Image (cartoon, helix red, strand yellow):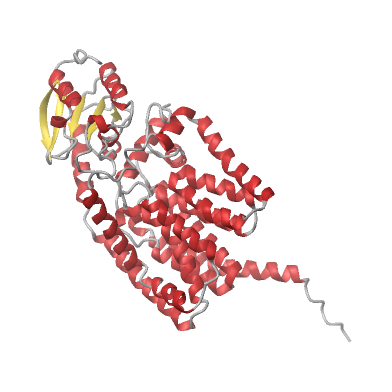
């Protein structure tokens, strides 16, 4: 009589079960991540942020230095990511970074699924991953589908929580640093991570070390003084609530309402559980609160800011559904699927008039200039440089940094005196040393028009004449080949 085969050790069985679980779930999440990002490939460009990053990447590839020859208020990771993608696949298309955005969303969903599975079981893991991806498109397509800062920040914030949940403090700190180096508000995830760390001195030390080292390395890899100024100390005017209060408030309420519609399947379970029981997820509530604070910071309320709220909302909804009857989970998934379909249709069908304007303007500029010419687009659409394939005449790619119009501010605090400190002297020097062949006034009646800016008005009068218009944008060509007689004060 043959002896019964020995059962495999428990650790082997657990490992096999985990492997089988992810073999089933990963393909589902991958297909869903690809499906929800289909609209992002439907247009050459979705937002000025994508355009800004594309122009930065081209300048960096030509030997430029971040915070010196090209500047932005953002940390360096995403510009470097664009630069790397362009180096490998060319800079004529954003398709490579769009693929990276799909992978970023997939990684975020996987990390959330792993967090939920560890806390509430296999079903919760599937629910969290699927709900996150369904809701991730629930904003204006310009905000949800662009390969912008927030999309690449979310995997870092999810990784920080995943590592903290497993008491891997050095790795959690590095993930917090990664989120901050994508966008400053990503550092908000440090609050729930600290909550999970508690008062463990060794844990706090490892967490602090893990967070500090990547930030210091990034500062040293760029210009440390410039890094500090452009990412931390130089944005006081941008973060002010003064000016355009009603305009900004309406934008905030509108984007809040849009995201609430996208979360129609998630919010009812959370609200119901709040009334009848506690979810036991204090760190997730703190994560949501910290993310909401990050959305409020700066008082601009752009739609893409709200992406930071979606991971903790998805996990809180998953926690709530573990308490409620099973049919509530089915309802949440069906409702979220329907809302997702609506937002995907919006992304595929909605017209993008500003993109069409930028494309016409870029075509006109490319026709009037040579590939080696430097041009200056005076407006808020840096993507036009990329579309026209022309080199910017200034390190400042939009009029916002020079007028405080950044953030859609259209009130009285727009003008030269509200610019980022030190920008106008540098701007005057750039244009005096290497005058642009063509200046394009794309203000179209907005508060940063040259007629309201003495320095730019004098520059145009000194050596430029109107040579054409495109959709309200005015093109100014140089009067003579000799240097423009423009004196730096």
Residue positioned 32% across, 40% down in the render: 238
User: Is 148 or 318 nearer to us in this picture?
Assistant: 318
Name which quarter of the figure residue 308 lies in.
Answer: bottom left
Image location of residue 113, percent across then percent down: 53, 65
Q: Specify whether residue 150 is in view.
A: yes
Residue positioned 52% across, 35% down in the render: 218
Quadrant of the frame with the N terminus: bottom right
Q: How many marks?
A: 0
User: Is 358 or 195 nearer to us in this picture?
Assistant: 195
Image location of residue 76, percent across then percent down: 45, 38
Image location of residue 88, percent across then percent down: 46, 39
**Taking 20 as reference, is 42 left or right?**
left
**Taking 334 as reference, is 249 left or right?**
left
Q: Residue 183, relative to residue 431: is it above or below?
A: below
Q: Residue 293, relative to residue 224: is it above or below?
A: below
User: Is 1 or 372 nearer to us in this picture?
Assistant: 372
Residue positioned 48% across, 83% down in the render: 325
Name which quarter of the figure residue 390 lies in.
Answer: top left
**Taking 126 as reference, is 477 left or right?**
left
Residue at the far bottom in the pictured view: 1
Quadrant of the frame with the C terminus: top left
Q: Residue 445, relative to residue 270: is it above or below?
A: above
Residue positioned 12% across, 41% down in the render: 471
**Taking 424 as reference, is 469 left or right?**
left
Image location of residue 281, percent across then percent down: 54, 67
Q: Specify whether residue 223 is in view.
A: no
């Amino acid at each position: 009589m043959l002896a019964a085969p020995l059962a495999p050790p428990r650790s082997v069985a657990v490992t096999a079960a985990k492997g089988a679980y992810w073999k089933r779930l990963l393909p589902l999440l991958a297909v869903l991540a690809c499906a929800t990002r289909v609209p992002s490939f439907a247009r050459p460009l979705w937002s000025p942020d994508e355009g800004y990053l594309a122009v930065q990447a081209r300048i960096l590839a030509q030997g430029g230095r971040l915070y010196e020859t090209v500047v932005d208020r953002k940390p360096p990771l995403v510009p470097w990511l664009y630069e790397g993608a362009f180096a490998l696949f060319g800079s004529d298309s954003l398709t490579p970074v769009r693929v990276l955005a799909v992978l970023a969303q997939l990684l975020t969903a996987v990390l959330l699924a792993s967090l939920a599975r560890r806390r509430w079981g296999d079903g919760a893991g599937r629910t969290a991953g699927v709900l996150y991806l369904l809701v991730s498109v629930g904003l204006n397509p310009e905000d949800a589908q662009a390969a912008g800062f927030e999309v690449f920040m979310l995997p870092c914030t999810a990784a920080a929580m995943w590592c903290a949940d497993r008491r891997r403090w050095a790795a959690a700190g590095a993930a917090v640093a990664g989120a901050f180096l994508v966008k400053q508000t990503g550092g908000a995830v440090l609050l729930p991570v600290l909550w999970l760390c508690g008062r463990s001195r060794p844990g706090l030390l490892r967490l602090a070390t893990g967070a500090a080292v990547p930030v210091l390395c990034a500062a040293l890899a760029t210009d440390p003084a410039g890094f500090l100024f452009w990412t931390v100390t130089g944005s006081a005017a941008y973060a002010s609530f003064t000016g355009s209060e009603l305009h900004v408030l309406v934008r905030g309420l509108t984007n809040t309402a849009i995201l609430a519609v996208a979360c129609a399947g998630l919010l009812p379970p959370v609200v119901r559980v709040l009334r009848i029981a506690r979810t036991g997820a204090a760190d997730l509530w703190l994560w949501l609160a910290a993310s909401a604070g990050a959305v409020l910071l700066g008082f601009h309320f752009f739609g893409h800011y709200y992406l930071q709220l979606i991971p903790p909302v998805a996990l809180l909804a998953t926690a709530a559904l573990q308490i409620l009857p099973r049919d509530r989970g089915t309802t949440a998934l069906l409702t979220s699927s329907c809302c997702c379909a609506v937002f995907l249709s919006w992304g595929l069908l909605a017209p993008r008039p500003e993109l069409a304007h930028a494309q016409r303007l870029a075509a006109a500029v490319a026709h009037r200039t040579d590939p080696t010419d430097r041009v200056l687009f005076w407006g808020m659409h840096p993507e036009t440089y990329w579309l026209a394939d022309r080199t910017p005449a200034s390190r400042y790619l939009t009029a916002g940094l020079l007028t405080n119009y950044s953030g859609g501010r259209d009130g009285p605090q727009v003008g030269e005196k509200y610019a980022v400190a030190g920008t106008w002297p540098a701007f005057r020097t750039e244009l005096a040393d290497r005058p642009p062949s063509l200046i394009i006034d794309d203000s179209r009646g907005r508060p940063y028009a040259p007629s309201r800016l003495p320095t730019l008005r004098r520059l145009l009068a000194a050596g430029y004449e109107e040579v054409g218009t495109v959709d309200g944008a005015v093109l100014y060509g140089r009067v003579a080949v000799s240097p423009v007689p423009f004196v730096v004060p």
